Image (cartoon, coloured by chain):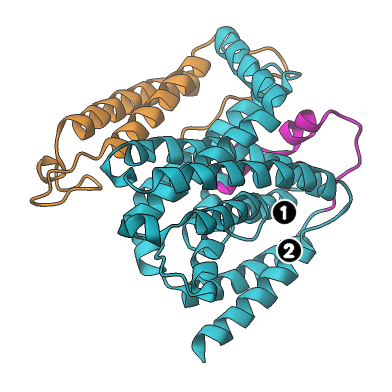
Amino acid sequence: MILAALISYPRAIVLGLLQGVSELFPVSSLGHSVILPKLLGWNIHQNDSYFITFLVATHLATALVLVWFFRRDWAAILRGLGRSLRDREIAPDDHHAKLGWLLVVGTIPAGLLGLLLEHKLRSVFASPTSAAIFLTLNGLLLFGAEQLRRRAPQVDEEDDARIAAHVSWGKAFAVGAVQAVALIPGFSRSGATMGGGLLMGLSNKDAARFAFLLATPIIGAAALLKLPQLAGHQGDGVRGPALAGAVCSALTAYLAVRFLMRYFETRTLTPFAVYCFVAGLACTIGFAV
Amino acid sequence: MQNDRLLAAAAVVVGIVLIVVGIVYFAEPAKSLPSFFPGHQAGSAHHHVKHGIAAVCVGLAAFVLAWFRTGPKRGAGATSPPPAP
């Protein structure tokens, strides 16, 4: 079958492993899923329906891993949301309720912009060359965010309490909207939200935590909405490789989020900025010549 | 207090409008949508289910805002509810 040949099991495994890492590292998963097939000479186009169907499975796996990793936070956040709805106010010391509503406020613009712009942006910026150029710009954005960041005050509060105290409604909305740049292959969703978090005065660790919590509903919802494609005729010939890719994606996503939450306790976005800039520039030049 | 009531009333109206818009998206194909709706496309039989879900979700968010704004008097130091999206 042609579809199966296009996304063979080895390719599905490589793309799945890549997806899990690059979705959470601030390096643009979409950009890498466009650039890597070009570098390896694979005849895969990111707007092909079978490839989008494949990505649905890997994204769903990533979202499930994020939910599992932050399961205690999500349970506390959902309880907080319930409390605030019952009491019809957000109590000053109810950090989980505040964080929950911040995530709702941040998710709304991301979801709306995603719905309105996804198809157009993917169509316009589908080429590996444009992805490489935007990956270079992503590096500059990450570097800029680190340079312009406000120093996070050292306080001994709980993680979620620190985030809830620092992030205002307007800032949550703005950071949510900024996630829309990730619709352009080459720009990173987690990079945009982490950068936004740094500019708001969060530490690297808190910015990463907020970015992952904010990304979960969007990644999960986008995958769930497209899940019928995987179950329907568009999934014919892709389901097996998609499952293999999803398992690999889940594995690397778990390792990635675990690594990043420790990494950002002491380190910054700068190495990712350097990687994006160098890799993006090299690919841009390589594709041009 | 007056502003709170005004905002709550506006949020309820916006919520109702958005839920109606969501239902239109669920019920009507792209060709039959009003031309000012995002996703309107002449001749297309596609149903913009995702647009409908988005409209309903934002409508519910507007209701939540109204719910907070019309709640009992907030205690000193309570956090303001989320702004209208």
- Which residue is identified by label 2? A272
Q: Which residue is drawn at 53% across and 64% down?
A: A31
Q: Is residue A179 above or below residue A135?
A: above
User: Where residue B7 sits: x, y (%)?
Assistant: 44, 25
Q: Which amino acid does label 2 sit on?
A: Phe
Say left or right for A233 vs A41: left
Quarter location, residue A161: top right
A1 displayed left or right of A11: left
> The residue tagged with tag 2: helix, strand or loop?
helix
Res A89 visible: no
Residue in the picture at 62% in, 44% down: A171
Q: Nearer the viewer, residue A115 or A198?
A: A115
Say which label, 2 or 1, has the lower sequence index.
Answer: 1
Q: Tell me what hue chain A is rendered in.
A: cyan
Residue A35 position (above or below residue B10): below
* Residue position marked by numbered label 1 in the rendering: A199
Palette colour of chain B: orange
What is the magenta range? A151-175
